[in-house]
Image (spheres, rainbow, N blue to C red):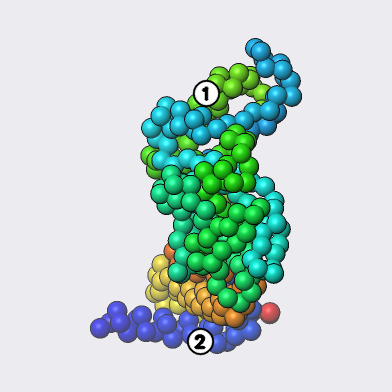
Amino acid sequence: MLMNRINIEILREIYHSIRQNKVRTILSGFGISWGILILVVLLGTGEGFRSSVMNLFSIFAQKSLYVYGGMTSEKHRNIKEGQEIRFDEKYLGQLKNRYPEIEAVSPETSVSLTVQNEAKNGTFRITGVNEDYMKIKILRAKEGGRLFSRADIENERNVAIIGENTETVLFGKKTGIEKYINISGIFFRVIGVLENDNIFSASEINSVYVPYSSYTRTINSNTEFSAFCLSLEQNADSKKFEEEMRNYIAHQSHFSVNDKQALYIANFETQTSAFESLFRGLRLFIWAVGVCFLISGIVGISNIMFVTVKERTNEIGIRLAVGAMPGSIVSLILLESVIITTISGLLGLVSGKGILMFINWLLTMRENDTFIKQMSFDAGASLMALFILVIAGVIAGAFPAIKASAIEPVEAIRYENRG
């Protein structure tokens, strides 16, 4: 009961002290609130940007590689400089047999041609691929349509999957699914229209995909191609595989493994890892900026506690003279510092979350016009920042508290505060 009374008295004294110094307390507290608000908003913006960028890559399988044959830049064995590196289906079959970790592999060869539907026409990129291509570059067909099947490839069916803009140009506002398009005098039945839900799939809006077997039979009889793509099992080491495949292709095609002009390999996993490293650096930078704001607020709290100790020197001296322990004086000053810091931090945290919610509301209103789709409130990081603030509040109040406890009672009673 006695302890509860003492605690209530301490809280009353702290309340009285804060009320007497309202302006200074509000200004110091504002520094703390502003610091954590800025930190919360910056972290939310950074995470929202990271999520939006990484979501763009969701169109690709995580462990996918794109291989592009170029031209040799040096003489090696019986290959001269300027020799073009090409592949064929047999080459891809050998590659898949050699590396069992390959889950899917597909050629990719294309040409721009005029495509017609009755009186409407347009020039589009016609790309020949097999059924594995849609597993590597994760494209989705709109409702009512489908992607290529193995039977489409084996039976050399004249079917096509088109982009959203291709459908609009050739069919207007009507659906193109199960209708026919004319490519170089050959009619292809449209079996699917690609979804357009991110920046990469948006690049497919003018596409026309046909089975590779049909492509070589009706559009381009050349069975060699300069590009293919593949995806690996989830437990495969894509970087190690890339190096081994480069050596194998160099050996099979008789060019130097050090000839970077002869072969280019785009490793999706390596590229996304580079982005992740970039975002980790960005997050550290955001924390550094936020902590700088917080430090300025903490310095303000420390200053106001020093002023409080100076103004209450007489009172502290009387307390010590009548038997108050130095520890109780330290506790009083520290608790006041922690209360100001905690309340200010909570206000900043709540305000920061409110701003993020408001921004998210604005983003939903302009969903199709913005790159960042949603800000993220990082509760863990925000609470950690608040915890750091409380610890900093203890440290900020420690020096004034120690100074207060070291006051000599007689000197303190005779002390007259002149401002």
> Which of the image's four quarters has the N terminus?
bottom left
Count of residue discs: 2
Query: Which residue is depicted at the point 55% across and 32% down?
Result: 88
Name of the residue lying farthest toward the left:
1
Q: Position of residue 391 (x, y in %)?
A: 47, 63
Q: Is residue 99 above or below residue 407?
A: above
Residue type (three-letter) at the residue carrying disc 1: Tyr
Circle 1 sits on which residue? 248
Q: Is residue 333 visible?
A: no
In x, y percent, where is residue 45? 59, 66
Q: Amino acid at mark 2?
A: His
Residue 181 on image: x %, y %: 60, 62
Q: In the rendered image, which quarter is residue 371 located in?
A: bottom right
**Which type of secondary structure does the marked residue at label 1 adopt?**
helix
Q: Mark 1, residues whose alpha carbon is within 10 Å: few (<14), some, or many (≥20)?
A: some
Side of 169 relative to 92 (left or right): right
Seen at 42% across and 77% down, the residue is 322
The label nearer to you, 1 versus 2, is 1
Q: Quadrant of residue 205?
A: bottom right
- Tell whether 418 sits left or right of 373: right
Q: Quadrant of residue 70?
A: top right
* Between discs 1 and 2, the one toward the N terminus: 2
Camera-side residue of 122 and 141: 122
Look at the image and tell me in which quarter the C terminus lies: bottom right
Relative depth, front residue between 85 and 14: 85
Few, some or many residues within 10 Å of mark 2 (<14, 14–19, 20+):
few
- Label annotation for residue 16: 2
